[in-house]
Amino acid sequence: MSIPKVFGALRGDRKPTRLAMWRFFRKRHPEVGSQPGTLVLAEDAAAPTIRVIDYDAETVEEREIEDLSELRSYVGRESVTWIDVQGLGDEQRIREIGEMFSLHPLAVEDLVHTPQHAKAEQYEDYTLIIAHMPAGGDETHIETEQVGIVVGRDYLLTFQERYGDVFDVVRDRIRHAGGPIRRRGPDYLCYALLDTMIDAYYPLLEAISDHLEGLEDRVASEPPQATLKEIYATKRELLAVRRTLRPQREAVTAIMRDENPLFSDAVRVYLRDCYDHTVQIIDVVDTYRELAVSLAEVYMSAISNQANEVMKVLTVMASIFIPLTFIAGIYGMNFAYMPELHHRHAYPVVLIVMGALALVMLVYFRLKRWIGPTSWKDRR
Amino acid sequence: MSIPKVFGALRGDRKPTRLAMWRFFRKRHPEVGSQPGTLVLAEDAAAPTIRVIDYDAETVEEREIEDLSELRSYVGRESVTWIDVQGLGDEQRIREIGEMFSLHPLAVEDLVHTPQHAKAEQYEDYTLIIAHMPAGGDETHIETEQVGIVVGRDYLLTFQERYGDVFDVVRDRIRHAGGPIRRRGPDYLCYALLDTMIDAYYPLLEAISDHLEGLEDRVASEPPQATLKEIYATKRELLAVRRTLRPQREAVTAIMRDENPLFSDAVRVYLRDCYDHTVQIIDVVDTYRELAVSLAEVYMSAISNQANEVMKVLTVMASIFIPLTFIAGIYGMNFAYMPELHHRHAYPVVLIVMGALALVMLVYFRLKRWIGPTSWKDRR
Amino acid sequence: MSIPKVFGALRGDRKPTRLAMWRFFRKRHPEVGSQPGTLVLAEDAAAPTIRVIDYDAETVEEREIEDLSELRSYVGRESVTWIDVQGLGDEQRIREIGEMFSLHPLAVEDLVHTPQHAKAEQYEDYTLIIAHMPAGGDETHIETEQVGIVVGRDYLLTFQERYGDVFDVVRDRIRHAGGPIRRRGPDYLCYALLDTMIDAYYPLLEAISDHLEGLEDRVASEPPQATLKEIYATKRELLAVRRTLRPQREAVTAIMRDENPLFSDAVRVYLRDCYDHTVQIIDVVDTYRELAVSLAEVYMSAISNQANEVMKVLTVMASIFIPLTFIAGIYGMNFAYMPELHHRHAYPVVLIVMGALALVMLVYFRLKRWIGPTSWKDRR
Amino acid sequence: MSIPKVFGALRGDRKPTRLAMWRFFRKRHPEVGSQPGTLVLAEDAAAPTIRVIDYDAETVEEREIEDLSELRSYVGRESVTWIDVQGLGDEQRIREIGEMFSLHPLAVEDLVHTPQHAKAEQYEDYTLIIAHMPAGGDETHIETEQVGIVVGRDYLLTFQERYGDVFDVVRDRIRHAGGPIRRRGPDYLCYALLDTMIDAYYPLLEAISDHLEGLEDRVASEPPQATLKEIYATKRELLAVRRTLRPQREAVTAIMRDENPLFSDAVRVYLRDCYDHTVQIIDVVDTYRELAVSLAEVYMSAISNQANEVMKVLTVMASIFIPLTFIAGIYGMNFAYMPELHHRHAYPVVLIVMGALALVMLVYFRLKRWIGPTSWKDRR
Amino acid sequence: MSIPKVFGALRGDRKPTRLAMWRFFRKRHPEVGSQPGTLVLAEDAAAPTIRVIDYDAETVEEREIEDLSELRSYVGRESVTWIDVQGLGDEQRIREIGEMFSLHPLAVEDLVHTPQHAKAEQYEDYTLIIAHMPAGGDETHIETEQVGIVVGRDYLLTFQERYGDVFDVVRDRIRHAGGPIRRRGPDYLCYALLDTMIDAYYPLLEAISDHLEGLEDRVASEPPQATLKEIYATKRELLAVRRTLRPQREAVTAIMRDENPLFSDAVRVYLRDCYDHTVQIIDVVDTYRELAVSLAEVYMSAISNQANEVMKVLTVMASIFIPLTFIAGIYGMNFAYMPELHHRHAYPVVLIVMGALALVMLVYFRLKRWIGPTSWKDRR
């Protein structure tokens, strides 16, 4: 499955920048000391679009909401109402939705101020869940997007930062009459969304795996130091994913463990499965991080090996020729009385001595394995 | 938001020194073995100024106290009384305030002896909270200041080390009739102060983030070793912030968890929000530390890369010219019988041989990628 | 015991590839967001073969099942029925088996989607256990295979990814009338399988131990840098084994601790033994990892030592001959008035001076222990 | 406060040796397998001196005990009796004191065999506390001494290894009529001693802080490698302090938490304060260790930087002069037919070519920033 | 106390080999999948000798057992019977002893299959304890031997791998009438054995301490790289000891905590003492490991320092003489028109210039502190 297929055309054109990670941890926050519940919207936040899917075992109704008053008719219905808000760029609308479902101001704040840590908080009539889904990215970068979920007795709200998501498959399952999701309540829908978000990490991790494998192959051929930086970047990226997912695991545990009347025992079994998937993804991330560390070690030793190699070449060259040059220097001196100079065979004798000296050095360095086959083999 | 704006003109002129961090951990402490409750004032402690804000849903009264006896009239009132003491330089006055509110001598000691670890301790009639707020600093240094809070049934005391704080927004919210803070007790005020202190870390962490990004950019252009020291300093600074905030998180948890009659359930919900913020700040600090470590690794590999580069230049130069110089040395010898010297074409032949030798060496080094494009690309 | 003997001829021919570890962590997973319980079969999954062993204290019946309807006759019998499914390549058949024993769809999913983390989950009428057995490999690689076990009141199902396993010894113990396994229920059979899987790691770890010892010996003779990479690979492999076994230990603990009516107290004593073995294997793996780290340190210091050695040779050679060459250069100058040139003994005097200078340098370097016996001893 | 002032003249002359730390962990221990309760005295243990302070709210009696029978009169008195034994060099006397207060033989063994880990053990009628106080040292070494405390219903015993301690301030507080210590029991006295011991670490840690600051300054001026060793030694020292204090913190917790009838609730509040101080000291120690690590990193990078610098100088010198020398060598050859030699302007042309070549090299190295201002700045 | 004295002549002659540690972790194990309780004897296991000491407060009986039927008379006696089996080389005999005392087959397996992790397991009528005692070794190697202890109501069995042990002092204490050990049951005897095993580590750790101190001294004189390998080996050895002792500590805790009717409260107090000793030994081991790491760091920095030193010598020599040689080369050229050559004072002037140049270089390098006193001091 290709990544674009997962995230849809909406996500495909956004190129993650080098600074993405830095910015990730810059939570939007209200003026220091301002009243709790103050909403601060991201400058580039999109205008919210609201889509409603209302279903029970027999019927499905799906529509886009323009006027919030249309929404009011869904409150208190027996059927399951999934209200999906994409884009958080209109404070007034979001506040109104919050009031319609009697959400605590702090809950609304958590939904809007992104990124929050994943968490599950139980209020009197509803449960607030903050989770993150992957929202595009490539083999060197995983972008995530916050999804706020409010699970009530007969409704489920989702608040997404941006247009487009990974939930189309869930929507298809709802549209398809007779599927198990139609016979169950908002708790099961919540499970389906959480599970989908987790599963969406798999293709991204596979891309990272391919990337690391590619880097490993490059060591075998030649050790370019630039690769090291790439490895460190991947390690950093995996760390960011880990930081995102660890609280999400805790949140799923919290829903499972707490005596939450909104979640039935049957759905808890499914949540255990979702929990297992989260643990597995985290484990894969940890393994990849260790592989990245291991790769970095291999590269580091390759670099230090290369430095040794360079040193050996220098030393062998210098050690052979410096003494020979010295001998040549001796017989280049202009002393008046240097009897050797006038011997008939002096010149060839000196040449032979030089050759012998060079040979001795070569043999010595070969014995030390600084030159020749072994050294060559070591290099790879 | 610029940092000076947050901390006011009072803080703007103080330049954090290199030694600040060292001194941070030098708690003021009484003579070894002296009686518990002995107060030791910092030598440069400012004289205390006392400001009172007394409010209930209808009225607000705000005044500066000169004579402690004026304070007595606020004890036991129904309204919420916030007594804000800035500057801890007068033992007598502080002791008197403590007696007025029947504080335990050890509690008073904790308020005065700075810096203490953040903590929350429940006494019979009041809760003592020690927390830290950022008190200025720039992208390479975060200065913090201890704030001691005593929460009683109808009063709240704050003890600050120095003049000026980040609480002006809270004061404005109190002055503004009809805000939720006016309808609630000292527990909510305490939450508002704690939350404001935490939020005040955000702009500082953003400055550090900018700083680290700047350092990252410098690697790309050229790897100066001095940057490494700056990275280590930032890492150290982040560590200090972490050490300050971790106990603060525990303190907030303690207030939430303990069966403290002074804090209502409604306020506990807000404290959970404050707890989330603290966790998030700590997480951001951890992430920045890991980024600093990652940056340091990149720099280290850049430095070792540079050393390799230097070595290669030396080796290439020496390996090419040393043998050539040797050949020149040979024909510089003054032997009487060196037949080559008298050949007509000997000189050009030798020059050609030398050139060929140099070429062979160059090709060899190019094949090893010690010179040429790849090596050049690696360098960045 | 040789490894082929343990794993049988079926495993012997498969050569673990370098990419094996990478792929290990690529769990097969259904389309993102698809319905829970959707089965995704590995592309190369083998067609399932089903073998039944049905036994009680008196009788043993063993047969291969072609038609699933044959299986139905075993359901509800008093005797213990072990149904062993090898190969997971037929969705329909596996789903039918699951329905026959009323398995939860998620349980079936866990059995089929490999690799899963080891775990033990208690359902109403049965316990699902996921474990891993070694499935071949050599001294540089341990391949593992998932075994899914379902323990019911009077039956035990095993689902294996591939043909062939390590359970033949258990089958022999069942065939052998009068053994304790014949007098006990599926809980004891489950213990026997788990214990066999753990014990099968011993010969593989011995192979790794031999391998590491071999690497240690190579340091003593000569320090080739290529060995380092091998050490890192072994460390990585051990890490993968640890990751596989740690959840398996937790799974055994879970069966022991939970109030599981399917496991008798007598079998719990045996499980404690199995737990001890798992802990011991993990401890051996940890020890080997630390030894690998220690070996890498020794190699690293050997490499840096070798670099020092190279540097010393270069420095000694250059420091001795460069000054001498300079002196020779002086008397090679062609100045018209160089009185020394015409002294009768100038030439021998200069030679003696040169010799003396070389001697002084040699003594100096010897005193610094850069040359001579000590340096030689250090090299190994 | 200077260190000699804290520890008195008795301690001032003892110079901590390099081996002190090694020996610290050599616990005195009886012959292997000997009966429990066997006392083994240090060879250089001083003869015990016994000082008694007996006090209640009205009276204080202070005397030195020569004959143990004098001690018997204090047993069972209503007033608080502090029996302070300094020096553990007389087995018979210590055993007799133990019997007088019905101490368990193992408790006596713990008091005498030093150093023990700090701990608090509750026996039927008394509580045994082992703690450590600083006993001298300077900025590179903290020496500690074990103090064994036995807290009974109306008495408190202290056993110190050597003469002299940090308790004189406590004694003064007892002598001073009307202090709170006079109105309370042995539990408060125990707290006062524990708190004094902890506070006595502050001046030593300040000395270490000064020392580390001094080392930091040295990096700025010049990077001598010897400093590194000093940093490692300080790190090691701080580690030893940490190891001493961590169990002491646990011991204080144990007294606070246990349902120990010997300690009143009022004193527990004070112990919480003492606990806070211990935590703070440990935190300071941890911070200093991290600073030491950070300093070591800075030094390591300074050293590697220096090595780079050296390499660059060598490379620049060699790269410039080796080609020039080669050219000079060419025209030093003695070929009969070298037409250039006889050109009138050949010599100056060659000199100019050489100069140009040198200039090109210099510009090249300057562009690479191997020479010139930047490189110079980097060096510091 | 010398090590041979502790371990007796039996142990003295066995030389620990380099491979000992590797082999330590090769547990003897039965054929994979074989029946639980199958005994696998070490190939070199000695034939078991059985010694019985039967004692109560009045009488002691000591004898060597040849025929197992003699043993039967001790079963069920009121007195305490210590049956000590040394050597595990006879499956039949060990199985018979197990049956005589109704031991569970898995318990017998644990006693025989060595090495097991230390543990304490409570069976219905007896407690099984696996512990390790040091069994010889020197300053670079600690050999350990498994001791299996079975504590029953009126008997205690010990199973040792080899002849000879550290228990002779305990035997002497039993023989000596009137000692406390004679008045107590097998629980106290068990304590005495465990405590003796722990105490036997002290002399070995002292040998290691001496060894490390010796290595530390060697840094001061000269830094041979071979020492590093020795340090790593010691670190590894200490790690192995730690791994052996940590589960032993847990085992002692388990006996203390569990509601084990076989251990009286009085003996639990002694076990607490034994626990303290174990913790202390582990702490000493940890400290030594940290010292070894610290030493390795010092050595590493010494090596890198030495490399710097070598580099500096090379650079200084080359930088001084290469330019001078170049100048000499210039005036060695054979151009027809080189006016300087014919100046009367040209030769001395050139010599003076050369000298001045050398001087400038020397001063430059001195200012950089590459040569001279400081550099010299740094070297140590």
Image: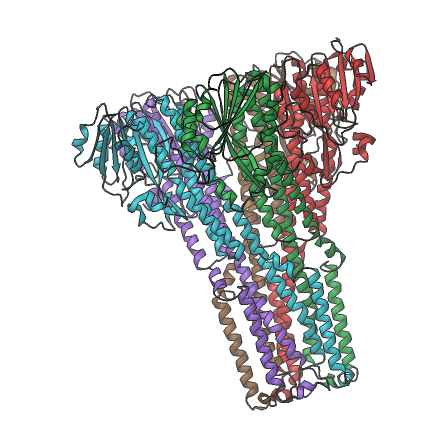
Chain colours: A brown, B red, C purple, D green, E cyan
Residue closest to the eye, C157 or C209: C209
The reply to whether residue A97 is in sight is no
- Name the residue located 68 percent from the left edge and 40 percent from the top edge: A16
Q: Is residue A244 left or right of residue E168?
A: right
In this rendering, position of residue B360 left or right of residue D262: right
Residue C18 in the figure: left or right of residue D319: left
Q: Residue C133, located in which quarter of the rendered image?
A: top left
Q: Nearer the viewer, residue A127 or D327?
A: D327
> Would residue B329 be seen by someone viewing this image from the given angle?
yes
Residue B27 point in image, percent of width and height: 67, 32
Q: How many marks on residues? A: 0
In the rendering, at what x and y percent does residue A67 appear? Answer: 75, 18
Residue D314 vs A43, above or below: the answer is below
Q: In the rendered image of this protein, does residue D233 appear above or below residue C74?
A: below
Which picture quadrant has residue D68? top left
Query: At which x and y percent is residue D17?
Result: 54, 46
Question: Is residue E211 or residue E71 the one in the foreground?
Answer: E211
Say left or right for D250 vs D227: left
Q: Nearer the viewer, residue B171 or D245?
A: D245
| Residue A42 falls in image quadrant | top right
In the displayed structure, E376 sits above or below C274; it is below
In the depicted structure, whether residue E33 falls above or below residue B169: below
- The quarter of the rendered structure image containing the N terminus of chain B is top right
Q: Give percent across and percent down for residue B218.
A: 72, 48
